[in-house]
Amino acid sequence: MRLVGRYKWAAGLVVLGITLPYWLLHDSFWLSVGTEALVYMAAASAWNILSGFGGQTSFGNSIFFGIGAYCVALLPVRHGWNPWLALLAGAVLAVVVSVVIGGLMFRARGIYFALGTFALTLILQILAEHYQWITGGDVGITSSAVSGGLAELYMSAAAYYYAALILVVIVVFVAHRVLHSTLGLSLRSVRDDERAAAACGVRIFKVKVVGFAITAGLTALAGGLYFEIVGFIDPTSAFGQTVATEIAVLAIVGGGGTLAGPIVGAVILVPLQQALGSGGLVALPNGLSLVIYGAIIVGILWWDPRGMVHLARAGRGLVVSRTRRSASEEDTRPSGASPSGAGHSMGPSQASPPESPPGRAPGLEGETAGSSLGEGDVRLGRENG
Amino acid sequence: MTAFIQVIVAGLLVGTVYGLFSSGLTVIFGVTRVVNFAHGDFVTLGMYAAVVLYSNYRLSPVIGIFPIVAGSFVLGYVLYRVIIQRTLKRGNVGGEEAQYGQLMLTLGLSTVIANALLLKFGPGPRSVQGVLGGVYNLGGVRVNESQLVAFVISGIAFAGLYLLVEKTYFGKAVRATVDDREMASMLGINIERVFAVAFGIGIALAGAAGAVLTTYFTVTPTVGEGFLVIAFVVVVMGGLGNIVGAMAAGLVAGVIQEVTATYVSLDLENAAIFAAFIIVLAFRPNGLFGRQVMS
């Protein structure tokens, strides 16, 4: 019953996504907003695999986004590749790069890893601006300049929308499979307590690298598709600060670590930003739109730092009893007394047991592990310190 | 040789200012564990405040720094109490689970501040012109008066911070809170107040750095992005929470930047700092100066 119910939701969402252009996204503005939301949804869902499930928050996924975009922009022109092949090549290159970065950066934990990946993507931005003979520098690459290769790829706006939708389905499916596999369980155990996970036999480094590689490959696909849709890429829109943080913002504000979080985040925040921005519904003075957007994000996180999914859940919790919720949830976060808040100070007792059967882990294991801990959050100060 | 010394001196002069706002970021992180993505924008805010004080009241940034520091402190204190405090302790949401939410919250705050400045002042560059325009020649090494003043003021402000943390009763409470929150709380330290004051001090240091920077650095609403990234790099290189480390790493960053700009390429100056940062992270994940926190 549970499984049927869950897939009903997924099927419903897919049907909604397919039919959306016919009853809501009539004009080209909203169709392009919808397409952009889907591309970012894919990138945010991919981010979620390493950073949400595995807790290794990355602010550098624009590295892979940019690699994907530049591969699709450059390979067809310089070497006459088929654009779809270039898309795949971007994914492969991103996986290779992620393994190198992982080897370098996974010694650093928590916020150090986040800031390290952030610095890496900014280095790539600066290098892309510096080596103009490869990237075209600040001028960027437009797909009209990319003659031949992409011309055959020319599609209608609706076709781009469906291409993005297919990508989202692929990414969310992969995320779902990962979440319910041994890898997903290992990732979550690493997130909750790295030392305890290691003690239970989880090969931490390998788990992180594999998670990172999956995230990187999928993000590169999103980046490649982004270039095909928008038709323009420059160092800032590939590797810049805004892309780097946007991917993480959508996932975290939506609800990091849950399958639904990045989807909710992209569905709500991308259209919001576009509607407020220039060319949107309202003509706001320069700057005000982002003031409002930023204030909304601050407001959401002020209300619940775990994101919108938890906001919605809190509302629903008033109606549905806790036991029923924990049985029907796709949530990977422990919904009880928040054991992950206890950090390293609580010792190995609270790790998710890696040997429990993969299929039934979400929602269940957190409830039991959390109840015995109580107020973990007070000692947080010692983490990282 | 004189040319090389010139480069090093220029690096040290700008590095002191980096060290100053970075020590603000490190105080905030060390005490409250909040990673403040809006830190660079508080530097920008300090810069605009100095510009306004100068253009409206003819107040030189050397004097204007006092109201700016006071205002920044109050702003930081209030922001902490109103917005951030709530996210640190809320029902059953653990701190670590909320950490990235907090981080995104400060990122949202950064968007709000930068764009509010854009709304108010427009995208064009602003600066304080006509103060501290002198150039000194010290044995062949040219030093701008404005940079020298910024250096001295940053040094004084940093010394003040150091004495505050090391020598005062409040500093003792801060260090106790950093060491062990629970125990500090049990001993009667009002840790929420310590957090709020520490946040205020961190923002005040950012404001002070902004005020001295305006004498030789033009300001636009988005300059904060650059400062933020430099501050992150400096703070991690110095060891998160280590104020002396932050100042030392600030000097290192300034020198790396100037040397790269002179001998490699101007547009790669920040790439060199970031590369140094990656190397430090990969080989000394706890910073150049180890783990010690505020002591």
Image (tube, helix red, strand yellow):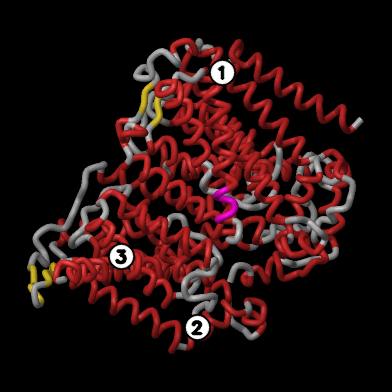
Q: Are marks 1 and 2 in contact (CB under 8 Å)?
A: no
In the rendered image, residue A108, in percent from the top left (x then y), is placed at 58, 61
Q: On the picture, is B264 further left or further right than A57? A: left
Q: On the picture, is A210 further left or further right than A231? A: right
Q: Looking at the picture, tell me which residue is in the foreground, B231 or B141.
A: B141
Q: Nearer the viewer, mark 1 or mark 3?
A: 3
- Up the image or down, A45 lies above or below B235; here it is above
Report the number of numbered marks.
3
Q: Looking at the picture, tell me which residue is in the foreground, B217 or A93.
A: A93
- Element class at badge 1: helix
Q: Residues within 10 Å of mark 1 (few under 14, many from 20)?
A: many
Question: Which chain's residue wears label 2?
Answer: B
For the point 58% across and 75% down, the residue is B191
Q: Are marks 1 and 3 in contact (CB under 8 Å)?
A: no
Magenta span main SS: helix
Q: On the picture, is B16 further left or further right than B128? A: right
Say the numbered circle drawn on residue B254. Answer: 3
For the point 36% across and 17% down, the residue is A144
Question: Which chain's residue wears label 1?
Answer: A
Three-letter residue code for mark 2: Ser
Three-letter residue code for mark 3: Gly
Quarter location, residue A280: top left
Q: Which segment is the magenta one?
A: A100-104
Three-letter residue code for mark 1: Tyr
Q: Nearer the viewer, mark 2 or mark 3?
A: 3
In the rendered image, residue A379, in percent from the top left (x then y), is placed at 68, 71
How far apart are labels 1 and 3 at the CA level? 47 Å
Q: Is residue B62 something one can see in this rendering?
A: no
Say the numbered circle drawn on residue A161. Answer: 1
Q: Looking at the picture, tell me which residue is in the foreground, A69 or A248.
A: A69
Say the numbered circle drawn on residue B295. Answer: 2
How far apart are labels 1 and 2 at the CA level? 56 Å
